[in-house]
Image (spheres, rainbow, N blue to C red):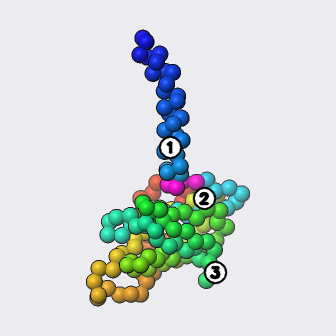
Amino acid sequence: MWLISRVARIAPGILLALFIFIQPSMAWRLPFVPENGLGGITGKLTGDLQPVGKVSVVLVQQDKIIDKTETDADGFYKFRYVEEGMYDIKATKDGYRTCIVLKIPVIPDHVTKLDFYLPRFNNDHMPDDPIVETYDHYYKYMDHPTVSYPR
C-alpha cells in the first residue's frame, strides 16, 4: 500500500518532466492543424533507404518562391500556413540528385503529406538533371497516416 501511494504522488511529476523534455524534439514531426482557411505540406525525404537531413526544401508557386526550409536530422520538413492552390517543391543537397515534385494541392484546413526520395550520386554515369515527378505519382505509393489528404 505504501508503494502505491508513493508512486501515485511522483507519477504526475515524472509525466510532466517527460512531456517537457520529449515534447520539443518531437514537435517537428507532429502533424499540425492549419487554421484560418490555410493549409500545409509536410513529409519526409529519404535517400538510399535512410532519412536525409539538412536538405534545402523550397516551396514554389508559378516560378515564385513562397517559402524555404531545411529537413531535420530525420529527414522531416514542413510548410505551415500555406494558401490554397497548387505548389511545387524542389529539394537539393550536395551529393544528391535534385528532386522536383509538381502540382501539390493545398486546400484550406488540411495538411498535404508528401514523402519522397532523394537519390545519392553513386557513380559518374548518373545523370545530373533533376528528377521531376507529380504529386499524383508519389501519392499512389505513400502510406496514408492520420493527416488529412485532399482528394
Question: Is the residue marked by circle 3 packed among few (<14), some (14-19), or many (20+) residues within 10 Å?
Answer: few
Q: Nearer the viewer, mark 2 or mark 3?
A: 3
Q: Measuring from the top left, give residue 135's x and y in whole percent.
A: 49, 72
Nearest the eye: 97 or 106: 97
Question: Is the residue marked by circle 2 packed among few (<14), some (14-19), or many (20+) residues within 10 Å?
Answer: many
Q: Which residue is mark 1?
A: 21
**Compared with residue 135, is residue 16 higher up or lower down, i.e. above or below?**
above
Which mark is drawn over residue 77?
none
Say what secondary structure mark 1 lies in: helix
Q: Mark 2 to mark 3: distance in Å?
A: 22 Å
Q: Is residue 94 visible?
A: yes
Identify the amino acid type marked 1.
Phe
> Which quarter of the picture shows residue 110?
bottom right
> Which quarter of the picture shows residue 95?
bottom left
Q: Earlier in the sequence, mark 2 or mark 3?
A: 3
Say what secondary structure mark 2 lies in: loop
Q: Which residue is mark 2?
A: 110
Identify the amino acid type marked 3.
Lys
Q: Measuring from the top left, give residue 143's x and y in whole percent.
A: 41, 59
Q: Mark 1 to mark 2: distance in Å?
A: 29 Å
**Compared with residue 55, is residue 31 higher up or lower down, i.e. above or below?**
above
Q: Earlier in the sequence, mark 1 or mark 2?
A: 1
* Direction top: furthest residue: 1
The region drawn magenta spans 28-32
Q: Is residue 51 left or right of residue 66?
A: left
Circle 1/circle 2 CB separation < 8 Å: no
Q: Is residue 101 visible?
A: no
Q: Earlier in the sequence, mark 1 or mark 3?
A: 1
Residue at 42 percent across and 60 percent down: it is 74
